Image (cartoon, helix red, strand yellow):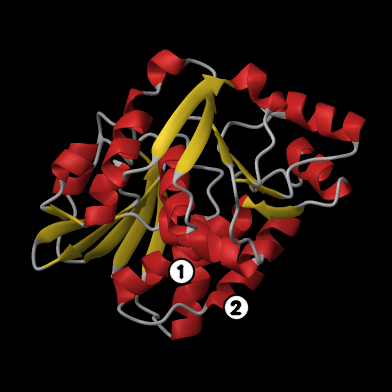
Amino acid sequence: MKAAVLGSPIAHSLSPVLHRAAYQALGLDGWSYEAIDCDEARLPGLLAGCGPEWAGLSLTMPLKRAVLPLLDRAEPLALAVGGANTVVFAGGRRHGYNTDVPGLVTALAEAGVAAPGPVLILGAGATACSALAAARELGAAKVTVAVRDPARAGELLAAAERLAVAVALMPLAEAAGERPGLLISTVPAGAADFLAARWAAQGEAPPQVVDVIYAPWPTALAAAAAAAGSVVVGGYAMLLHQAARQVELMTGRAAPVAAMRAAGLAALAR
């Protein structure tokens, strides 16, 4: 059976390491997993070319939203969040799932994050929408979202309405004035460095900080939070657990999380 991760750019993806480690641990010798550079324009043709030898696909930027109209069925969570990061082929049909949300929830639980109080999310992309859903799972009824351009937050606001989560938008530059119980950064590397500098200068940070970046690690944000005594969750934990759920969906077998974790950490160390 074949599987792959699609996105553009994709060469940096750690997903092949994680999925191949799972196949090896599960004894699935006939399974393969590759990285394929694919943008939104090429996605319909690539999906059309996936025959019965394909088990599924992992999707990353910029495809999580673009894939929805190309699916035969999407789970309610993927529809609510407005993005699917997983396609499973079964019975000649394309089934879409979002494993980012359960991946983040599992990563937070693993780190002992609970009852966050006020939640601040940095960014308004597809991952921020998944973070909104994860915050709801933790019991947050209201979330502040700091964005660089409020005019481009329409997709996030639509997701918030579907998820029944109240959202207050604010400029990213003003995020330093917030005092959240949980901060989740979904912005690119460097975009939150101004917050890290402020935390380092003040010697304090939100008690719980998530940065979805996993390489290079630690980010300036994560390092400043750790130095201030915060509980810090990195993007690798989220990546690992969302990949584990993908393995389960595609293979029908329990994911060997320990083997996947070890393989990914070894790859990052290299």
Q: Give, as a three-letter code, the residue at label 2.
A: Ala
In-front residue for pair 261/109: 109
Instruction: Name the quadrant containing residue 99.
Output: bottom left
| Residue located 48% across and 74% down the image | 22
In-front residue for pair 4/220: 220
Crowding near pointer 1: few (<14 within 10 Å), some, many (20+)? many
Crowding near pointer 2: few (<14 within 10 Å), some, many (20+)? few
Is the residue under label 2 in contact with that under label 1 (CB below 8 Å)?
no
Residue 167 spot, x, y in % from top left? 43, 33
Q: Give, as a three-letter code, the residue at label 1.
A: Ala
Residue 246 spot, x, y in % from top left? 38, 65
The quadrant of the picture occupied by the N terminus is: bottom left
The quadrant of the picture occupied by the C terminus is: bottom right
Secondary-structure class at tag 2: helix
Residue 247 spot, x, y in % from top left? 39, 70
**How many numbered tags mark residues here?**
2
Spatial separation of the CA atoms under disc 1 and disc 2: 10 Å
In the picture of the structure, the residue carrying the numbered disc 2 is 258
Which residue, as the protein is rendered here, is positioned at the far bottom?
27
Relative vertical location of residue 20 with respect to residue 49 in this rendering, above or below: below
Q: Can residue 16 be seen in the rendering of this structure?
A: no
Instruction: Name the quadrant containing residue 108.
Output: bottom right
109 with respect to 80 (left or right)? right
Which label is found at residue 244?
1
| Residue located 46% across and 53% down the image | 134
| Residue located 60% across and 49% down the image | 117
